[in-house]
Image (spheres, rainbow, N blue to C red):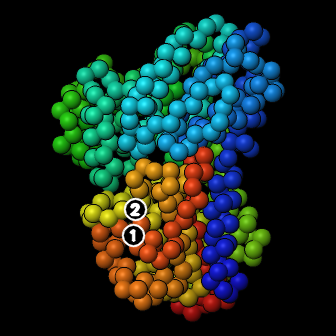
Amino acid sequence: MTDIPARRALLQELFAAAVDAARAETCLPPHLPAPADGGRIVLLGAGKAAGAMMQVAERHYRETHGLGPDRLVGLGVTRHGYGRTTELIELIEAGHPVPDRAGLDATRRTLELAAQARPGDHIVVLLSGGGSANWIAPVDGLTLADKQALTRALLRSGATIEQINTVRRHLSRIKGGRLAAARPDGVPMTTLAVSDVPRDEPIAIASGPTVPDPTTLADARALVARYAPDAPENVHRALLDPANETPKPGDPLFSGTRFQIVARPALSLERAADIARARGFEPVLLGDSLEGEAREVAGDHARMARELAAAGRRAVLLSGGELTVTIRGDGHGGPNQEYALALALALDGAPGIAAVAGDTDGTDGGTGSADDPAGALVDETTLARAARSGHDAAAFLERNDSTGFFERLGDLLRPGPTYTNVNDFRAVIIDKAEAGQP
């Protein structure tokens, strides 16, 4: 493979394979619990994959178990633009990453459905990344506007999603195990999740509405003091209220609950690695839980790619995880696009090296629209093409305007909504046929 179009086609194929490995159609049905004799299945879902998960689960219970509207009830909420068609289960689209009124109303109804479960029922919770914004139920004394202001501040601060969710859990009536607490005693609850978080920690997926929370109010206060000290006064007051502490490991309220991950970032990386091998490349897996500033990680990966090129290896660097961007400028873009722009600058046109970085949910930062780009592609011509058009890549990076840069080059990755979410995917191809010189 010695030509740029072929390398770019392979990058697109690797990204598509990573997404396909996490689709609800393939990963969910084997894990759906059977209904009890005469009992109902109560389906509750949230997140970017919730539309597809609810659609697949509804079809499974109708076709495999013959359930009708008397025994199959529920409600799902997903990001705007990520809805799918369902027959019995209502599906609502709501705000992400900043929550909105639709999410607030859907969350209230979700808590009511859990509380109304009857003996013989089985509550099945379908979770994926994005659920933290979709299920929004502020604690007493906190308004939707307060939560929106806090979310915007934390997203701009450089805080990791794990840190943001620690705060969210202590300001919510559904997160941090509180959905499990809402159900009547003795009603079983099974949670099936698509993981988009480092180390696949259950408490971090959609802020853990059905699992115990090991973090504390003190942890949340420290994070707000560090990343959002100007948050609304109601936020600071709520984090001082002992009533807003979350249920902890060992609490008997979690008796009868079960949590299982049905798709995870590691599997998506493995599928991409299989394709790389089949195309004659050596996959080099850097891990599925990378964190850190996007531009700094890009610098590290550029050094690795140059070292592999100098050694004459034909390889693909593969990595997942969720990077962060500390916003200093007034541009647009997410961590994947910023990583790609910083990588292009660090590689400085090194021959035979090309890369893709994209969010597997189909959008990366942006305005919250389902048409936002998922990421971007770069190759050895990226900087030269930009310079010929009068565009300074370093200036775009300084303004955090990676979307603007790649849009001008026509190199944005735009798969549209993927209806799943196993976090970011990055692949850097080193083709020794052209990259053999350091």
Report which quarter residue 50 is drawn in: top right
Do the CB atoms of the residues marked 2 and 1 lie less than 8 Å apart?
A: yes
Locate residue 219 relative to residue 35 in the image: left or right. left
Reply above or below: 127 against 352: above
The three-letter amino acid code for the residue at tag 2 is Gly
Q: Residue at x 39, y 69 (%)?
A: 404
Asked whether residue 203 is in view, the answer is no
Q: Nearer the viewer, mark 2 or mark 1?
A: 1
Report which quarter residue 105 is drawn in: top left
207 or 341, nearer to the observer? 341
Provide residue 134's location: percent of width, then percent of height.
Answer: 46, 35
202 or 424, nearer to the observer? 424
Q: Earlier in the sequence, mark 2 or mark 1?
A: 2
Asked whether residue 66 is in view, the answer is yes
Q: Residue at x 66, y 13 (%)?
A: 121
Disc 1: which residue: 404
- Secondary structure of the residue carrying tag 2 is loop
Provide residue 370's location: percent of width, then percent of height.
Answer: 50, 50
Q: Residues within 10 Å of mark 1 (few under 14, many from 20)?
A: some
Locate residue 234 relative to residue 346 in the image: left or right. left
399 or 158, nearer to the observer? 399
Q: Residues within 10 Å of mark 2 (few under 14, many from 20)?
A: many
Reply above or below: 73 against 435: above
The three-letter amino acid code for the residue at tag 1 is Gly
Q: Residue 333, which numbered label?
A: 2
Q: Residue at x 62, y 83 (%)?
A: 4
- Secondary structure of the residue carrying tag 1 is helix
Provide residue 26's location: percent of width, then percent of height.
Answer: 74, 44
Work out how far the residue at label 2 is from the one at label 1, CA to CA, in angstroms.
Answer: 8 Å
